[in-house]
Image (cartoon, rainbow, N blue to C red):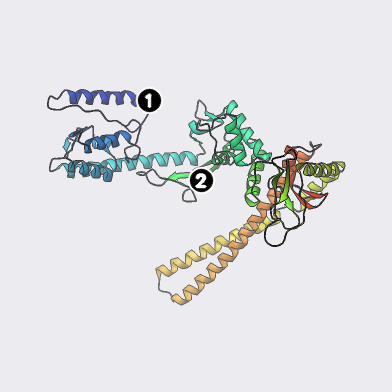
Amino acid sequence: MSTDHDDQFTSYQAQVDYYTNYIKGRADWQFVEVYTDEGITGTNTKHREGFKRMVADALGGKIDLIVTKSVSRFARNTVDSLTTIRKLKEHGVEVFFEKENIWTFDGKGELLLTIMSSLAQEESRSISENCTWGQRKRFADGKVTVPFSHFLGYDRGPNGELVVNREQAKVIRRIFSMFLNGKSYAGIAADLTRDGVKTPTGKAKWHINTVQRILTNEKYKGDALLQKSFTVDFLTKKHKVNEGEIPQYYVEGDHEAIIPPETFDMAQREIERRAEGPHRGNHELSGRIRCWECGFWYGPRIWHSNSKYRKVVWQCSGKYEGGTHCHTPHVTEEDIRQAFSSAMEKLLSVKGEVIANCREVMESLCDTEKLERERDRLDGECRSLTEMAQAMISENARKAINQDSYQKRYDSLAQRYADAKAKLDAVTEEIRKLKNSRADIEAFMKEFEGTESFSAESWNRLADYATVYGIGDVRIMFKNGQEV
């Protein structure tokens, strides 16, 4: 049987009982075993352990005859079915399909088996296509379905909807908080493993990929992107990431959010920032202290590790790279704390002015209205050029045209399209950066208004990085674009 629905449990037991009694009731047969695969599809033999064990026993001489309910129960893949039958015949093992009354040692057996296997395969294809159509129709209608057994933070509601699991939601909030407070993926995974927190699949050890998937899953802010992947082939069940082959659907506000949308969006910007910046370790200062002279980032070094004078300092990683050494000094964590505290005091003393400047920057430098009009114009130009190229191709297919002239016109259109597309991509990227800058400034203002002194949290939420210029000269670059 190929489904694991509860209503088929009695059918499964009935089949086992029936064939056990059926074989034992024949005086000329000696019963070996009933081999079963419950809840496993017959389209391939990859996960059919019972089937594979039965074939191995038959090839090992333990079985002379296999009694099967029907061809579709043996395999819904014609190639698998015929390959297995021929292999069994070579070893003197016959298969009897009760429903179709086919004996594989019979002269007509293989012909009938080929026909019946093909029909079974087509039936499987039809069922698969119908299921796929139904699922894609649900996606198009904005109906969200997820694998609840592996989805940390949510349970299935009475009508199949997403319902927040309050205890698991604490883990999700903790992951986002740790990340925004400077923890690396590896650091978060290590902390969760150490504290005995179970992974989405119930395992003890957390991995970096699991943390990354949680941080980028839009469902935690109440939305849902549907059809992220799809099944390529109904026989192999191979999945691939959807890269535009089929439509995707984005549903906003589908269910209760665990992470506020603005916090989720902040995490996405931080992910992007880290991907473009230096390697981030577990410490909140990792990848956050820059050398003014050579541009390298500072890393931790341990001095006097085996003595009472043991000390952790931060030193330029490029100090001993190449032939020329930079002259910037090492700093301690306390130096950075003092520099940040001093910078914060200066900003807090003119808090009203800082906030006013932030608003002015957002209104002037982060205004994307003009760029968005240019983006729409370039997008229209690209569409128009594409239509012109398609019209040329159609015309060339319908009637005889001088091919040299056609190629020149086509190459000219292709070049115009390439130029317009490059400009469109550049403008789109500029809009993205400005919107991110605006969001960073808004987040800075919200955090700044409630900050009084240095803390790991305020450092990560307010400061972008520190630059060391010299002894006692450390400058903090804040996320509103201001250096102090």
Taking 178 as reference, is 366 above or below it?
A: below
**How packed is label 1: few (under 14 Cα within 10 Å), some, or many (20 or more)?**
few
Tell me which amino acid carries mark 1.
Asp
> Along the horizontal axis of the image, is 105 left or right of 130?
left
Residue drawn at the location 46% of the way across and 51% of the way down: 245
Looking at the rendered structure, the secondary structure element under dot 2 is loop
Nearer the camera: disc 2 or disc 1 = 1
Query: Marks 2/1: CA distance?
Result: 32 Å
**How packed is label 2: few (under 14 Cα within 10 Å), some, or many (20 or more)?**
some
Which residue position holds label 1?
6
Q: Which mark is residue 29?
A: none
The quarter in which the N terminus is drawn is top left
The image position of residue 394, as x and y in percent, is 44, 66
Q: Which mark is residue 248?
A: 2
Tell me which amino acid carries mark 2.
Gln
Residue drawn at the location 61% of the way across and 58% of the way down: 425
The image position of residue 234, as x and y in percent, is 36, 44
